[in-house]
Image (tube, rainbow, N blue to C red):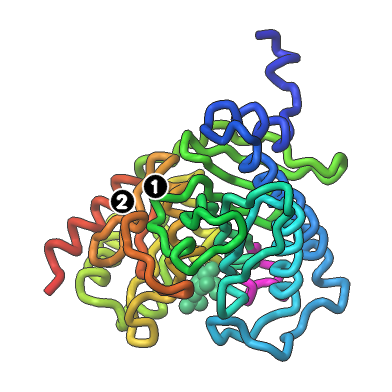
Amino acid sequence: MGSRQQNRIVTLDEFIIKNQKSHDDATGSLTRLLRDIGIASKIVNREVNKAGLVNILGDADSGNASGDQVQKLDLFANRVMIECLENSGECAGVASEEDEKWIKLKTIKTRSADYVVVMDPLDGSSNIDVNVSVGTIFGIYKKLTKSKSGIKETDFFQKGHKMVAAGYVLYGTSTILVYTTGDGVNGFTLDPSIGEFCLSHKNIKMPDFGIYYSVNQGYYQKFDLEVRRYIDNCNDENYRLRYIGSMVSDVHRSLFKGGIFMYPNTRKYPHGKLRLLYECNPMAMIVEQAGGLAVDCKLNRILDVEVTEIHQRSTIAIGSKKMVEDFMDHVKKYSA
Ligand code: P6P
């Protein structure tokens, strides 16, 4: 293929459509759904990028389902994502970190909405007003409920390995959308000059190993022995500690440079802090598709953990295959 052809811009839309054929989704409904998530991400990106300029910061007076103080940008991102998902006509319902309960979306009469979406519309939002990257995380399931309109809680209570797609958007020095539909991981960087996500990282493969470990070292004394022994091992091996406090950023770095991200149980979060449905599962699907591993601190594969609540928490160790395997060896060796 000529070099000109190789450097041709491939937009997210074009890529999604081209890859639609490799799925049983011949109707194009997953394609439309993914494209609408891309549109929502561009709108969120615009506001995130000017957050420091526009009075959109400051704590909104409401807390979210997790009881965290919610920044207005969280609410904005949640609203935009839900509106775009509703416009797609392909999404029957949404479970979001920002809403206590799952939401049934209005569907278009002429078409059945076959999917439900789980999402954290703006993860790491406590970093927004200090200009540290934040992200959107999403996962897509085929709904189980057969009826044309209704959905039930059980449509959301599917194990992570049942997802048909998962992705994240990282609003950082540049804005990148990374997603998988189960046959590899691809990254698209937003080109603001044309307002398009353009293919920038084809078929991402996570390094089997890396020199970074990512955990909130401030909780070291609160971790179980086996986690502390693994962290000691990272120190003995002179790995570098990198911890941004935004899961999307920490996992994204590991995806490209290799590394392991952990959020173990602590006294404050005996089941871990991160949410299984819309944080751990989508990131686990992406990392596994790129050749990495994702387990909880009891060594269960994240994508196989039973989902019983929308805001269920989970511990997690996710990243380069050899590093997660090393973590698992330490858990087996030192756990009571
Ligand atoms: P801690 C952000 O609030 C978040 O949900 C994740 O993005 C991040 O990895 C984690 O919490 C940081 O939590 O307790 O280390 O501040």
Q: Nearer the viewer, residue 68 or 208?
A: 68
Q: Main secondary structure of the magenta part?
A: helix
Identify the residue shown where x is 41% and y is 59%: 158
Image check: 150 left or right of 75?
A: left
State the image quarter where residue 313 is shown. Answer: bottom left
Amino acid on which the number 1 mark rests in the picture: Gly
Q: Nearer the viewer, residue 322 or 20?
A: 20
Image location (x, y in percent) of residue 169: 64, 53
Residue that label 2 marks: 323
Up the image or down, 17 lies above or below 235; here it is: above
Q: Is residue 61 magenta?
A: no
Image location (x, y in percent) of residue 248: 55, 59
Marks 2 & 1, CB-CB < 8 Å contact: yes
N-terminal label among 2 and 1: 1
Residue that label 1 marks: 210
State the image quarter where residue 332 is shown. Answer: bottom left
Magenta residues?
125-134
Q: Under tag 2, what secondary structure?
A: helix
